[in-house]
Image (spheres, helix red, strand yellow):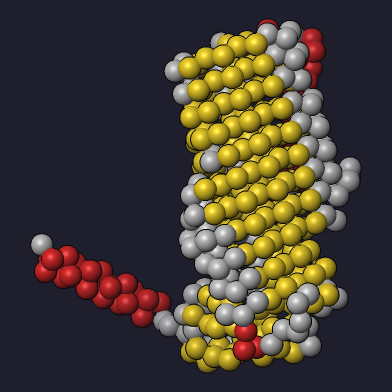
Amino acid sequence: MQTSIMKIMQLTLILTLLGVFAPDVFAGYKVVDYGQVVTESGTTYDDGDGYMGAALTVTDDGFYSGTNITLNATGYWAGALVLFSGSLSLTDSTINLISSPLGVYAQEGCTITLDHVNITGAGLGIGILSESTATLTNININTTGVDTGSLFLDIDSSVTVYLNGNTLTNDANSIFVNAASTLTLTGSNGSVITGDITASNGDYGASTVTLTLTGEGTALHGDLIKEDSTITITLSAGALLDGAGEVSNLTLNPGAILGYTDGLTVTDTITIGAGITIDFSSLTETDNYLVLDWTGASISGGSISDDQFTATNAEGTFSVQGAQLYFNATAVPEPSTWFLLGAGLGALALTTRRRRS
């Protein structure tokens, strides 16, 4: 993890030096600077020289507003979109990381608004650093290969995300919030976040992550890593938290779903409603499993009892022991059972379809 942070720090230093001493080197194809205001629609930009250049650069109080913009990044360092002390609004647009490690990179008090923007490729989707702010609405980020993930915040930055049936996906960390930064994310209508979420102080100050997930199919698949920081998660009916780790504050409203992987620890406050489903599809053998541990946390809204929970994909009984919830699994489906069940459901669907036709 620290290696990834060091890479970002090194990249930040390089881009800062380039911005101060030689802005034209990384400026790339389109440059908006020195208070310029540019509004465009339906334009495609490729990065400048294929090595240092960004497809679009906004610096020195420049403002760029674009609709239906495509940015293609093959530059080794600068990426698709670089901002230094600039502002940007991008709507209905696409960013392709072809052979570049960066999609959007903002530093030094930038202000960014992205609405219906898709980012794909191998690299960091969005990096917001150094007292910058961003509002991200209906964005899709599907990236691979970088531990800092789909979304990275650093050094007292603030990001608000609204997902409505969207995806944030990375094969390592989906979200990394570092060094006194703040992330507020609301996901609904089948939005899916895949990858670990980390909140870290980064030797700079505690970070804060607040996630609110609502509606059927809305899910977080990934572990939660809390390093001297705060993670608060609220789930409503039909929303799923599928991961292990540690959270500060957890609210499971009636009908919420937890996916068991390796247990979840709550350190500050916990609120549990009725009718909570625990999905044990990851289990492969019978045993007594620790599902929730709220030792030292305060309980809001009354006590917690085992009859508030229902198990799926396993048979057994729940028991609350002190400030811990255990599940004694007495039967779990064999892998072959899952295969036969899937095959049977597929055959049933095909038969039904043929009868209707």
**Circle count:** 0
Q: Is residue 71 left or right of residue 254?
A: left
Q: Position of residue 176 (x, y in %)?
A: 70, 46
Q: Is residue 39 left or right of residue 225?
A: left
Q: Nearer the viewer, residue 198 or 61?
A: 61
Q: Is residue 52 visible?
A: no
223 in relation to 172, above or below = below
Q: Quadrant of residue 338?
A: bottom left
Q: Quadrant of residue 54?
A: top right
Q: Position of residue 318 (x, y in %)?
A: 62, 89
Q: Quadrant of the C terminus?
A: bottom left
Q: Residue at x 86, y 49 (%)?
A: 206
Q: Residue at x 60, y 42 (%)?
A: 150
Q: Residue at x 63, y 35 (%)?
A: 126
Q: Position of residue 156 (x, y in %)?
A: 83, 38
Q: Nearer the viewer, residue 142 or 114?
A: 114
Q: Position of residue 118 (x, y in %)?
A: 50, 35
235 in relation to 172, above or below = below
158 in relation to 215, above or below = above
46 in relation to 354, above or below = above
Q: Residue furthest front?
A: 301
Q: Is residue 191 left or right of residue 291?
A: left
Q: Residue at x 83, y 74 (%)?
A: 297
Q: Is residue 353 visible?
A: yes
